[in-house]
Image (cartoon, helix red, strand yellow):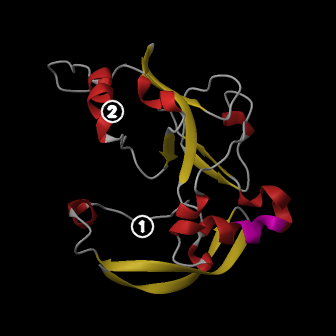
Amino acid sequence: MAGFYSKDTVVIGDVPVKDYTFAEVNNVKGLGLMWMLGKLDGILGLGLDGLSQSPEFNFIGVVAKALKSNVGRMAGTFGVFLADHKDEESEIALGGWEENNLVEQLSWGPVRNPELGHWIVPVRSLRIDDEVISYCDDGTCSAAVDTGTSLLAVPSSVFSEVYEGLRHYAPLAGHCAGPGPLLHLELDHLDRKSVV
């Protein structure tokens, strides 16, 4: 991989973030087939400081400084809405969240090991439909929340159980549209059950 650093003005709503430093990649060799064949504009990371090369490369931190005079203490927050129907649009709200996209009251919780840069949250229990997966019974379960992936990764010791629980047969037509088993994560910091 190779590239160079650039600076530009990024506008969030009507707030300019001047001289935002970012990396441009012009040689994706070594990053894998997806990067060579994919039509990608780039990556906008929403990770914590631990994943950034330095503070000026942490997008959320830089945007928070720029938005502070407009939104105050909410400047470092963001909300992600993933559309579930074709008449909806997914969105990322910087400096807060869109109230209309909430299906329940907002809850706050701790991030484990924030120095690693990942959004790692404690998980109380894990279920597939109504079947409890005992892996989280010891109280040490965690999940990394990442808006940049559609993958589900689990420790190898519980992989078979999760794989078998989520596996369902597709119609002969080959499409995977339609419901399958539901994966439930009960987050540790909430008094009531939260399903993700």
Task: In this rendered view, identify the residue nearer to me: 57 or 194.
Answer: 194
Indicate left or right for 106 with 54 as reference: right
Q: Name the residue under label 1.
A: 42
x, y percent for residue 119? 56, 52
Q: Which stretch is magenta?
A: 64-68
Asked if residue 120 is positioned above or below residue 186 in the image, the reply reads: below
Determine the image quadrant of residue 72: bottom right
Q: What element carries label 2?
A: helix
The answer to if 21 sits in the magenta stretch is no
Determine the image quadrant of residue 161: top left
Q: Earlier in the sequence, mark 1 or mark 2?
A: 1
Q: What element carries label 1?
A: loop
Residue at horizontal 74 percent and vertical 38 percent from the top:
99
Asked if residue 110 is positioned above or below residue 22 in the image, the reply reads: above
Q: Taking the image as drawn, is residue 13 in sight? A: yes
Q: Name the residue under label 2.
A: 158
> In the orientation shown, which residue stands out farthest toward the front?
138
Task: In this rendered view, identify the residue nearer to me: 127 or 82.
Answer: 127
How packed mark 1 is, by other alpha carbons closer than 10 Å (few <14, some 14-19, many 20 or more), is: few
How packed mark 2 is, by other alpha carbons closer than 10 Å (few <14, some 14-19, many 20 or more), is: few
Q: Estimate the spatial distance between the alpha carbons at disc 1 and disc 2, rounded to whole Å.
A: 34 Å
x, y percent for residue 153? 36, 42
Residue at horizontal 85 percent and vertical 67 percent from the top:
69
Asked if residue 7 is positioned above or below residue 149 in the image, the reply reads: below
Residue at horizontal 22 percent and vertical 19 percent from the top:
169
Residue type indicated by callout 2: Val
x, y percent for residue 135? 42, 29
**Which part of the image, by quadrant, shows the N terminus?**
bottom left
Main structural element of the magenta stretch: helix, strand or loop? helix
Determine the image quadrant of residue 8: bottom right
